[in-house]
Image (tube, helix red, strand yellow):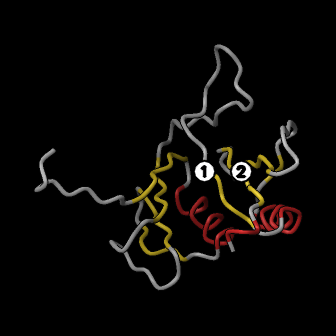
Amino acid sequence: MDNDVMIKFDAVMIDCVEPNELAEFYSALLKWKVVYSDDEYTVVAPPGRERGEYPGISFQKNPDYVPPVWPDESGVQQQMMHIDFLVNDLDKAVKHAISCGATVASEQFSNYWKVMFDPSGHPFCLVERSECF
């Protein structure tokens, strides 16, 4: 391994039709702030962080974006990834996510996490892990 090579995690990039709108959703959900925005992409990051002080979540404009089908169905658009968010109270976190614009997936597979969809149809999970707070 080359010790001169340095790699730093920057951000997760999520495709969507309207980057500003999706960034506002995640900004409200996580209580983060928008740290950069232009016509092509928007970035949210934790409070106290500025552009370049990541990690953050970036939203990239893709006018051809098609939301994935969840759960998976053969022959249709598949998800590439989803984000898990740890929460200390699942019921309260679900209510908060809904108030920000999320919807609850009709199929659920556990009492310890809840599958949700952001306003663009990306799945994400709220996972109860109170010991992490």
For badge 1, the amino acid type reads Ile
Residue beneath label 1, please? 83
On the rendered image, what quadrant is the N terminus found in?
A: top left
Q: Position of residue 90 (x, y in %)?
A: 83, 62
Q: Is residue 37 left or right of residue 70?
A: left
- Callout 2: helix, strand or loop? strand
- Callout 1: helix, strand or loop? strand
Residue farthest bottom in this picture: 48
Q: Is residue 60 left or right of residue 76?
A: left
Q: Is residue 121 left or right of residue 104?
A: left
Q: Quadrant of the rendered structure where residue 94 is? A: bottom right
Residue count near mark 1 (Cα–Cα under 10 Å), binned few <14, some 14–19, many ≥20? few
Q: Earlier in the sequence, mark 1 or mark 2?
A: 1
Q: Position of residue 126 (x, y in %)?
A: 74, 56
Tag 1 near tag 2, CB within 8 Å: yes
Question: Front-most of 61 and 12?
Answer: 12
Numbered tag placed on residue 115 in the rendering: none
